[in-house]
Amino acid sequence: MQDDGTSIFLGLTSVLTNGASAFLTLGLLLWAAQFRIADIPLTLSAIIVCFILDDMRYYLHHRMAHRIRWPWAMHVTHHSSTHFNFAVALRQGWTKHFTGTTLLKVPLVLIGFDPVLVIFCGALNAVYQFFLHTELVGKLHPWIEAIFNTPSHHRVHHGKNPRYLDTNYAGTLIIWDRLFGTFAEEDLNDRPDYGLVKDLETYNPITIIFHEYWGVLKDVFGPNRSWKDRLKYIVAQPGWSHDGSRQTSLDIKREAAQKVQQSLTARA
């Protein structure tokens, strides 16, 4: 399938681009380590605590990648497929280390965790998430679904159904979504419809990788805009526009909720 081929190509090339730029992140963390307030020894308990804290860091990073347009310009690549399988797990952007969210790793180093351990925990989280990209696994035991991110939860995250937009940001532990109010349960009567709100309809990897960056540039340098508007085209939620001509995910969810309410009122 052509879509899978594109995903695999993007995965292989992202290993090269993100792998090379990962040294910038490691360099930043090694530099930050000189300001750490403690030295946490490398023990099993330290690894577990670091992983849990880094998982919360991932939740924040992932939420920002959906709510702020600049990191979304990188992350949109991962959501651009209308399929959901292991190949999609490989479909990653090339500019991961240039979104600014890498700074979220710094506090872990400042409190005393080894920079290499922080990088390792992030990599381990990524490996776990690979196996979430499947429709072959249904819902698991309720206790597992309550604590961990599962294929069911991640299918919801990839859905463009209004009720599923901007939900289930978890990496390994779904508890963060439950705690911060971004959790949504998979409804078997409303299967996730995968892809973007406005699908790209192309398999060209260059277009997939850079289309949103090009959109940002056109919006920032467009005519008749204040400097505040130009800045908001970078840091506001995807879909924001200075003239209200577009919709954010919140607008889409609100509109869908209103339609449901109107339908219920009409039936009453």
Image (cartoon, rainbow, N blue to C red):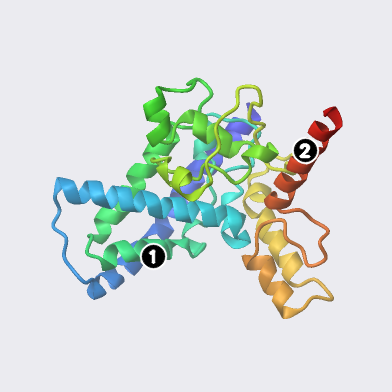
Question: Which amino acid, mark 2?
Answer: Gln
Which quadrant holds the C terminus? top right
Which residue is label 1 attached to? 24
The answer to whether 130 appears left or right of 73 in the picture is left
Q: Which label belongs to residue 7?
A: none
Q: In the image, what residue occupies the spot 60% across and 56% down?
A: 67
Q: In the image, what residue occupies the spot 39% across and 65% down?
A: 24
Question: Which amino acid, mark 1?
Answer: Leu
The answer to whether 15 appears left or right of 215 in the picture is left
Question: Which numbered mark, 2 or 1, is in the foreground of this view?
Answer: 2
Report crowding for label 2: few under 14, some 14 to 19, many 20 or more residues within 10 A (C-alpha): few
- Residue 236 pos. (x, y %): 65, 64
Circle 2 — which element?
helix
Which quadrant holds the N terminus? top right
Q: Nearer the viewer, residue 251 or 100?
A: 251
The answer to whether 145 appears left or right of 76 in the picture is left
Q: In the image, what residue occupies the spot 52% across and 53% down?
A: 63
Establish if 172 lies above or below 225: above
Which residue is label 2 attached to? 261
- Residue 56 pos. (x, y %): 39, 51
Report crowding for label 1: few under 14, some 14 to 19, many 20 or more residues within 10 A (C-alpha): some
Establish if 161 lies above or below 255: above
Establish if 159 lies above or below 119: above
Mark 1 and mark 2 in contact (Cβ < 8 Å)?
no
Q: Nearer the viewer, residue 222 or 54?
A: 54
Establish if 84 lies above or below 75: above
Q: Earlier in the sequence, mark 2 or mark 1?
A: 1
